[in-house]
Image: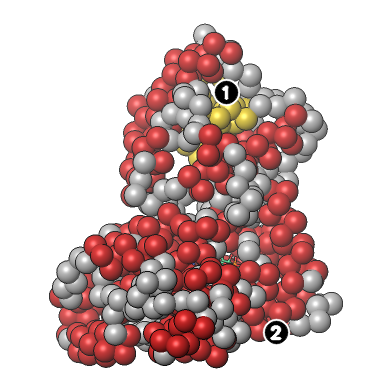
């Protein structure tokens, strides 16, 4: 007889605290196998980058450290989960797999379907638990708002730390299944990026709620100051190093005695948006590939490789765009407004398709498909239900980086240019260029497009299509499916700032 076990399959939920699958697995008498798979097929996806897997690796290391105190093991494989389960099933009777529901990309969705088939074929129970406030199979968004609050108020699920019954896999079996060692880049810390793990998630949250939050609303749009003024919780949420519920409850504990309640309220409303966007994606995941509003399929944007390359490398000749791109490549982070601005420049000024933005998914350390794709579409102006915003990169530069501190940090070729003229360096006379050690066209490019002309052309096209019946019909469908009418009027739930 094969020994009976349960499996807790970790995915984008890399923590021990308030973890429903772990909690419920502990309620059962069967011993638990803790399992994570670095899946080569998912790692090869167009949206995947070493920075994501490094964060995952760090999160898992943090979990393993915690397990040493209780003599437990978390088995990490570099292999497809179906392969791992198939071998384990040969030696053990897998009673139940416990995991969270994942609102991921098409690759992980298809993987989950294959796992479902496997569990059915082998009479294995698969218990999937709701991830934060994202409800699978939700029929209507009518009461979702109240549901979010209800979910956030439920007590966290805390395991009994003294009562573990872990499975130890036979060493030869683990060795034969665990797969190749992960690339060194994944296993090596890169100090330019936030480090993963439950411990650090709480440390970031603590420093935000005790000190940094005070400037939240003032600094949220500033490319440099937002790096401290915003919470920086996004990668910890994306990889589940902390549950949204615990984040919310900890925040509420600080609310009454906080010196800037307005800032905290603004922050809390964004926690709501997090789940709102993921709920949208959960309900209509074709958004990863197609315009959510099919009326915009009529727009043709010829691919321009030279534009795309210049944008990716931060060499468009538009300082704020270039500084943002170089910054996100180097650090994995940009604040919301700058993310929206670079997408606006790509899709409107350069007139490129948002579907060609996988590069950006790879750069964001906090890449979360459920937020990323709906946001890309909103910023690209293809939803038909949001105001179309074409960001002016010069105005944004003057307003949000008036002293040029962010520009100079990321564009060293502009470092000697005075702040009052740095935002439009192509306007410098040849004497000024000499004086400031920056020859436009040699040290730094001329803008690759005329910002005003391309803005006007894009605006004319997208606004004229917006008036079409197809866009309007689709707009009504989208509002009905994804937005509670009451919420739409407030703008909060459409994610407008
Ligand atoms: C084109 C584009 C792509 C984006 N892709 C992602 C992504 O892949 N992953 C991701 O987490 N966020 C994404 N965002 C939303 C937002 O920019 C980031 O959540 C935020 O900048 C993260 O920084 P923070 O944790 O310091 O945010 P804070 O301002 O401190 O906010 C706290 C949390 O609220 C949530 N949040 C904040 N703003 C938004 C928003 N506009 N929409 C949804 N949730 C929000 C995040 O979970 C964030 O961690 C994207 C925005 C745009 C415009």
Query: What residue lies at 76% left-to-right and 82% top-to-bottom?
Result: 260
The residue at 41%/41% (across/down) is: 43
Q: Is residue 6 left or right of residue 438?
A: right
Q: Which mark is residue 82?
A: none
Label 2 near label 1: C-beta < 8 Å? no
Residue corresponding to mark 2: 262
Q: Residues within 10 Å of mark 1 (few under 14, many from 20)?
A: many
Mark nearer the viewer, 1 or 2? 2
Dot 2, crowdedness within 10 Å: few (<14), some or many (≥20)? some
SS for dot 1: strand
Q: Position of residue 98 (x, y in %)?
A: 54, 37
Can the viewer see residue 378 in this picture?
no
x and y percentages locating residue 211 in the rendered image: 79, 71
- Mark 1 / mark 2, whichever is N-terminal: 1
- Residue highlighted by disc 1: 5
Q: Is residue 487 above or below residue 77?
A: below
Is 232 displayed left or right of 383 in the figure? Answer: right
Mark 1–mark 2 distance (CA, rounded to whole Å): 49 Å
């Amino acid at each position: 007889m094969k020994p009976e076990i349960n499996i807790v399959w970790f995915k984008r939920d890399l923590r021990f605290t308030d973890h429903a699958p772990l909690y419920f697995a502990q309620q059962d008498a069967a011993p638990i196998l803790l399992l994570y798979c670095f899946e080569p097929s998912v790692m090869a996806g167009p949206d995947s980058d070493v920075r994501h897997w490094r964060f995952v690796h760090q999160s898992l290391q943090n979990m393993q450290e915690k397990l040493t105190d209780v003599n437990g093991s978390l088995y990490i494989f570099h292999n497809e989960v179906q392969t791992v389960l198939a071998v384990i099933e040969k030696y053990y009777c897998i009673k139940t797999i416990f995991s969270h529901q994942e609102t991921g990309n098409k690759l992980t969705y298809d993987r989950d379907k294959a796992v479902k088939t496997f569990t059915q074929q082998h009479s294995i129970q698969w218990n999937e638990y709701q991830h934060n406030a994202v409800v699978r199979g939700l029929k209507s968004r009518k009461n979702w708002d109240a549901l979010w609050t209800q979910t956030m108020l439920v007590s966290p699920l805390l395991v009994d730390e003294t009562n573990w019954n872990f499975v130890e896999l036979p060493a030869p079996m683990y060795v034969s299944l665990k797969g190749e060692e992960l690339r060194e880049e994944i296993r090596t810390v890169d100090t330019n990026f936030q480090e993963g793990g439950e411990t650090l998630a709480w440390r970031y949250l603590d420093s935000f709620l005790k000190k940094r939050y005070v400037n939240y609303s003032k600094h949220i749009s500033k490319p440099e100051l937002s790096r401290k003024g915003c919470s920086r919780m996004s990668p910890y949420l994306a990889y589940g190093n902390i549950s949204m519920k615990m984040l919310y409850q900890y925040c509420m504990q600080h609310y009454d005695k906080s010196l800037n309640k307005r800032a905290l309220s603004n922050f809390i409303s964004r926690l709501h948006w997090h789940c709102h966007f993921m709920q949208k994606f959960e309900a209509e995941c074709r958004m990863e590939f197609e315009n959510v509003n099919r009326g915009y399929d009529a727009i043709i944007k010829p691919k321009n490789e030279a534009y795309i390359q210049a944008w990716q490398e931060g060499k468009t000749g538009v300082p704020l765009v270039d500084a943002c791109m170089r910054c996100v490549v180097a650090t994995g982070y940009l604040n919301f407004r700058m993310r929206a601005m670079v997408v606006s420049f790509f899709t409107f000024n350069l007139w490129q398709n948002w579907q060609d933005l996988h590069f950006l998914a790879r750069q964001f350390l906090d890449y979360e498909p459920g937020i990323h794709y709906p946001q890309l579409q909103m910023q690209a102006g293809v939803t038909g239900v949001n105001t179309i915003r074409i960001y002016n990169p010069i105005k944004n530069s003057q307003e949000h980086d008036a002293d040029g501190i962010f520009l100079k940090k990321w564009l060293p070729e502009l470092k000697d240019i005075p702040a009052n003229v740095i935002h439009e360096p192509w306007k410098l006379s040849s004497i000024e260029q000499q004086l400031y050690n920056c020859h436009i066209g040699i040290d730094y490019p001329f803008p690759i497009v005329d910002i005003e002309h391309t803005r006007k052309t894009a605006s004319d096209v997208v606004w004229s299509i917006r008036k079409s019946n197809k866009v309007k019909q689709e707009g009504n469908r989208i509002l009905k499916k994804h937005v509670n009418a009451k919420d739409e009027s407030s703008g909060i739930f459409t994610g407008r700032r």
